[in-house]
């Protein structure tokens, strides 16, 4: 990975100009923009506000670059000393825009800085004329809608979470709630296409947001070269876990909506021998941020239930080490109150580890009950305990789940396949825009520069 400093401080003789390098080095590549306002694709996964969306945008961007696109991923800069440009590969980079103070701002207070984000993005739009923008999350969608007012761009959106669902279980809605719901409806109705990551999300959009707008279902993926089956003994040896332990794993952020409390209380009710069960919680936190408060709350519950000696807080774990944790575990538990898709589920299954998860959202799509894991009602402590006990208590069945889980991911959820579907969608949307322009040239501003559809992308999806 190469870090490039801000253009103003760059020496043209040693560091490529961020406004020139991509286009001059790849004249036959079409530049497209992925916008992820708060989910920095270059961030360390597991820190505050860094989770599934960050992984999705980063992996999609890099995979699209391999298919022939020039991919610029835009996010908001949250630290003054972070590099403005992060070059992930020759044709894929993260660009951090200054929009408000260069510090972490909770999402519920971030919208006021989105107009500044739009203006910062337009500087790059003027240079590269991205004809297609793929936005991620509702605030990014608002940015895309604003850019459309002044530029002829095609707009794709992925929600990652829905306010229409989130606010059903929130007693006190934040002040931004009405704005979010309005934008979520507007982007569904006005975007060229909305990408739902599961049939369940598509159904939720139709029933809770709007009956209008075009939706295509394209799932999330996982890096099957990184997440794959390895010997459990090898993983436990590297992590220094005992061979005879029954390991229950959680991977994710510290957030009340992730349901970690439900998992902890379920572990206190397990019928399996307490001396042989270890709960391993993987996820970073910052003592000065809300995730730090949530970790302290979970630690207090662990202590109150007498589980301190059987619980390991592993902290933030890099993606290169995560497969060891998944493989070392006997079961991975996802107790979220809601998940549009659930990347942790397919990462775990790719490593051959069965999953027990809440029967919500996209988890009902990625997990096949009784074949790759089990689904239970969210926040049902007893149901989670029973499901975990079933897997821990039947080694033969657990082995069958392991084989079926890894095969399902290998067949359906590789990032290359996901990117090929997105590339095909982009190609069709851009082709339609050209047809529209030819039929009504005076009604459109016209695309600045010819659209070059990657030939490799065409062959991948034909």
Image: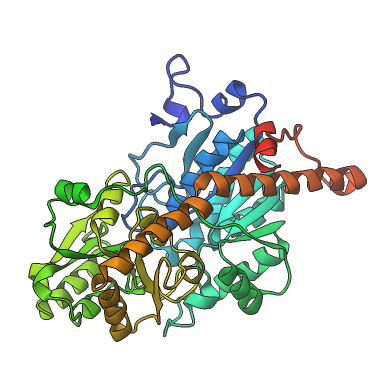
**Left or right of residue 21: residue 126:** right
Residue at (18, 61) in percent of width and height: 313
**Left or right of residue 258: residue 440:** right
Residue 44 to residue 136: above or below = above
Residue 146 placed where, x, y %? 65, 55
* Colouring of the image: rainbow
Residue 202 placed where, x, y %? 62, 69
For the N terminus, the image quarter is: top left
**Left or right of residue 348: residue 296:** left
Residue 23 to residue 113: above or below = above
Residue at (56, 65) in percent of width and height: 198
For the C terminus, the image quarter is: top right
Residue 210 to residue 412: above or below = below
Pick the front one: 239 or 397: 397
Quarter location, residue 380: bottom left
Residue 381 to residue 134: above or below = below
Residue at (68, 52) in percent of width and height: 155
Quarter location, residue 349: bottom left
**Left or right of residue 380: residue 298:** left
Pick the front one: 132 or 393: 393
Residue 349 in view: yes
Circle count? 0
């Amino acid at each position: 990975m190469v870090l490039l400093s801000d253009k103003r401080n760059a020496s043209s003789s040693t560091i490529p100009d961020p406004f020139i390098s991509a286009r001059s080095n790849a004249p036959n590549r079409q530049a497209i923009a992925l916008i992820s306002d708060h989910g920095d694709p270059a961030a360390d996964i597991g820190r505050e506000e860094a989770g599934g969306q960050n992984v999705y945008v980063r992996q999609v961007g890099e995979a699209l670059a391999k298919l022939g696109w020039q991919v610029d991923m835009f996010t908001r800069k949250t630290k003054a000393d972070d590099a403005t440009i992060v070059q992930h590969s020759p044709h894929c980079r993260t660009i951090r825009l200054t929009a408000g103070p260069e510090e972490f701002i909770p999402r519920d207070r971030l919208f006021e800085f989105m107009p500044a984000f739009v203006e910062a993005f337009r500087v790059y739009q003027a240079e590269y004329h991205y004809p297609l923008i793929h936005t991620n999350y509702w605030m990014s969608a608002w940015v895309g809608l604003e850019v459309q007012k002044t530029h002829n761009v095609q707009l794709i959106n992925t929600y990652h979470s829905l306010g229409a669902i989130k606010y059903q279980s929130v007693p006190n809605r934040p002040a931004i709630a009405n704005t979010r719901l309005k934008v979520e409806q507007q982007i569904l109705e006005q975007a060229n296409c909305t990408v739902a990551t599961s049939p369940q999300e598509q159904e939720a959009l139709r029933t809770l947001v709007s009956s209008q707008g075009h939706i295509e279902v394209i799932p999330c993926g996982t890096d099957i070269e990184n997440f794959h089956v390895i010997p459990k003994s090898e993983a436990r040896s590297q992590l220094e876990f005992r061979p005879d332990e029954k390991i229950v794993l959680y991977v994710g952020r510290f957030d009340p909506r992730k349901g970690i409390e439900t998992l902890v209380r379920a572990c206190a009710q397990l019928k399996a021998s307490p001396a042989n069960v270890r709960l391993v919680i993987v996820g970073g936190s910052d003592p000065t941020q809300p995730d730090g408060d949530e970790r302290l709350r979970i630690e207090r519950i662990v202590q109150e239930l007498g589980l301190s000696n059987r619980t390991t807080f592993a902290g933030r774990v890099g993606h290169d080490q995560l497969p060891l944790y998944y493989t070392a575990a006997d079961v991975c538990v996802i107790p979220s109150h809601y998940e549009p898709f659930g990347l942790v589920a397919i990462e775990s299954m790719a490593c051959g580890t069965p999953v027990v998860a809440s029967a919500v959202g996209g988890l009902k799509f990625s997990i096949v009950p009784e074949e790759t894991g089990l689904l239970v009602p969210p926040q049902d402590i007893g149901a989670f305990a029973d499901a975990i006990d079933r897997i821990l208590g039947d080694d033969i069945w657990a082995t069958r789940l392991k084989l079926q889980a890894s095969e399902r991911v290998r067949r359906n959820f590789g990032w290359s396949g996901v990117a090929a579907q997105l590339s095909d969608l982009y190609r069709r949307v851009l082709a339609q825009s050209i047809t529209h322009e030819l039929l009504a040239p005076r009604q459109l501003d016209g695309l600045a520069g010819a659209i070059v559809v990657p030939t490799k992308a065409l062959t991948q999806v034909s």
